Amino acid sequence: MRPDVEIRLITFVQGQIGKPFDYGAHDCVTFAAGALDIISGGNTAEVIADRRKTVNELDAYIAKYGDIESHIALAGGYRIDRGMMSTGDLVICKDDSGESCGVSLGARTAFNTSDRGVVLLPNRALRDVHAVMRVDNG
């Protein structure tokens, strides 16, 4: 990852810590999309915000536009082995309650949780990792 992109990503995550979870405005998907935009130079967060406003729209949105993994792939993302995870990689966890996406900051990954907002979790503590995706940024 280019140093300037890494600095912007870390600054972004630090600015999100402590903000309360707000579905459709500041949830796990919009948080991950914001990180993805910094890494890729894209506008995924804007696209998602325009199309998905409530929890009732989520299933229809995914059926029509795809899930966060699809958005990452459209931005040039590709799956990597979890053991190769580094700063800027996007981590998708899935369990019975759904899917969550965070961004790796080295030994920790930032996730936006519904009960605590953005938190940093040690990578060794991550459960139900479905995919780790990388987007090259030159």
Image (spheres, rainbow, N blue to C red):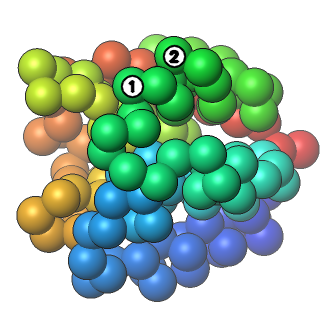
Q: Residues within 10 Å of mark 1 (few under 14, many from 20)?
A: few
Picture coordinates of residue 92, whole percent (x, y):
38, 30
Q: Is residue 59 above or below residue 100?
A: above
Count of labels shown?
A: 2
Picture coordinates of residue 29, whole percent (x, y):
45, 47
Observer-nearest of 83 and 39? 39
Q: Is residue 19 above or below residue 112?
A: below
Q: Quadrant of residue 26?
A: bottom left
Picture coordinates of residue 51, whole percent (x, y):
61, 46
Q: Secondary structure at mark 1?
A: helix
Residue 50 tag number: none
Picture coordinates of residue 41, whole percent (x, y):
83, 54
The reply to whether residue 37 is visible in this rendering is: no
Q: Which residue is mark 1?
A: 59
Measuring 77% from the left and 33% from the top, which residue is drawn there?
75
Q: Amino acid at mark 2?
A: Ala
Q: Amino acid at mark 1?
A: Asp
Query: Residues at badges 1 and 2 in contact (C-beta under 8 Å)?
Result: yes
The reply to whether residue 43 is visible in this rendering is: yes
Measuring 20% from the left and 51% from the top, which residue is drawn there?
122
Measuring 10% from the left and 64% from the top, which residue is drawn there?
115
> In 3D space, how far apart are the residues under numbered discs 1 and 2 (Cα atoms)?
6 Å
- For residue 40, side relative to residue 132 (left or right): right
Observer-nearest of 25 and 104? 25
- For residue 94, side relative to residue 39 (left or right): left
Q: Secondary structure at mark 2?
A: helix
Quarter the C terminus occupies: top right
Measuring 46% from the left and 84% from the top, which residue is drawn there?
15
Q: Which residue is mark 2?
A: 63
Give the residue at the far right of this rendering.
Answer: 138
